Amino acid sequence: MRVGVIGLGYVGQTIARAAAASGHLVIGYDVSAESVAKLDAKEIGNFTGTTDETKLSGCEIVLIAVPTPLTDDRQPDLSFIHQATDLIARNFKSPILVINESTSHPGTLRTEIAARITKASGVVHLYASSPERVDPGNANWDVKNTPRLLSGLTPEAIALAKSFYSPFCDTIIETSTPEVAEAAKLFENTFRQVNIALVNEFAQIAHAIQIDPREVISAASTKPYGFMEFTPGAGVGGHCIPVDPIYLSNVAAKAGVPATFIELATQVNQAMPAYVVARVIAAAGGSIKGKKVVVVGVAYKPDVTDTRETPSAEIIRLLASAGATVTWNDHVVGTWMGQSSSPIEGSDIAVVVTRHSGLTEAEIKKATYVFDCTGTVKGVDGI
Ligand SMILES: NC(=O)c1ccc[n+]([C@@H]2O[C@H](COP(=O)([O-])OP(=O)(O)OC[C@H]3O[C@@H](n4cnc5c(N)ncnc54)[C@H](O)[C@@H]3O)[C@@H](O)[C@H]2O)c1
């Protein structure tokens, strides 16, 4: 089949490549020439990228994989979804299958996508929702072996979407409505966000009573049921864990239901950079004025180049406002905010926020003092 993908970011590329590898002719459309250019360099046969939306015409299936971030005032931003729906309304005058993979609140497929397209074009397409669960950098779980949630507005849409995914996805779980699939995606990431906040809070309690939080977590993890291990860190980054729970709390607010846990978890996670910096200042005897501090790892997690919502940004800001001379080191990211990665050597203090594989302990310990937020550097202070 001819398959179009709107948005060639991480998710769009993943699905485009999987669909192409299973024999479909795939056309990826992106507003960013840069995203398309990056793709062309490593193009595979039946998958091409374009910034020309008219090239999508003739596609029988169109997938939406556009960003769903927050606005400046931290509200759900559906503008990219709306751009994608407008594009479909403009370019498709007879019915196709539209599948949304972007993360969004329950009701997005029905009201923000299908209803908008029908209103704008008068064409009634088939609609399915299959929120992507891919985890960048995860060597064990990929698009093939990660079970996929799927639902649609009609049985025909569900059947067609299932037949599209089944060649390259081992397990497809059909939910009764698209709203269930959409809500499940938000709930999964909220579950992580809340548990990360809990473990971050616990790490602070444990430190205050002079117990190693990571040893406690390891000990608790020996319980074979009813416990799941989460580890503390400098905060949460990426554009899923810090963002998706806010889509859920926003839904709660509209429904007039409190989202106390979600809001509290956001607060706890957002306060971690300040906690880290306070610990570093305390370890330095109460002041870091004039100290050379390097923040190690500005990607939001190991072995990815993604710096969105990285807690390193706030840590750097707080260290600088406490009078330190701050640089950052990240050989995977390389360039960030117009600056290049700096060496660790020669620093008075290294604050390890994210540790990519390949960064040795010896390299980190070239700084005079190390504060480790990752639990991977032996024999140093940290959380
Ligand atoms: N990255 C992940 O790990 C991940 C995992 C699961 C779900 N998701 C969800 O998938 C969606 C996409 O995420 P991503 O990480 O691929 O985002 P991304 O930012 O990497 O890529 C999005 C791409 O969409 C393009 N774009 C923006 N507006 C467009 C438009 N109107 N038309 C065409 N292209 C447009 C951007 O230029 C960009 O290349 C989001 O809803 C996200 O929450 C992401």
Image: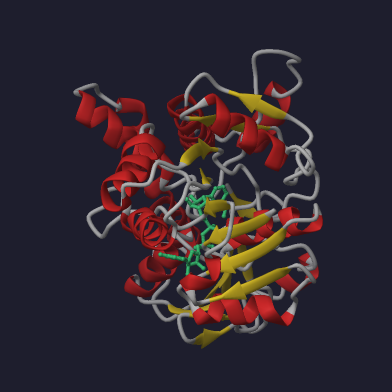
* Image coords of residue 25 (percent x, y): 71, 62
| Vertical order, 325 against 244 (above or below) | below
* Image coords of residue 108 (percent x, y): 37, 39
Frontmost residue, 156 versus 256: 156
Residue located farthest toward the top when viewing the structure as drawn = 225
| Vertical order, 261 against 331 (above or below) | above
Frontmost residue, 199 versus 255: 255
Can residue 53 be seen in this snapshot? yes
* Image coords of residue 316 (percent x, y): 43, 70
Frontmost residue, 166 versus 3: 3
Residue located farthest toward the front when viewing the structure as drawn = 94
Relative side of 111 to 48, left or right: left
Relative side of 44 to 180, left or right: right
| Vertical order, 11 against 179 (above or below) | below
Can residue 302 be seen in this snapshot? no
Quarter residue 323 falls in: bottom left
**Which colouring convention does the figure follow?**
secondary structure
Q: What residue is at 43 percent from the left and 47 percent from the top? A: 242
Q: How many marks?
A: 0
Frontmost residue, 163 versus 383: 163
Quarter residue 287 falls in: bottom left
* Image coords of residue 377 (percent x, y): 72, 56
Q: What residue is at 41 percent from the left and 52 percent from the top? A: 68
Q: What residue is at 42 percent from the left and 81 percent from the top? A: 290
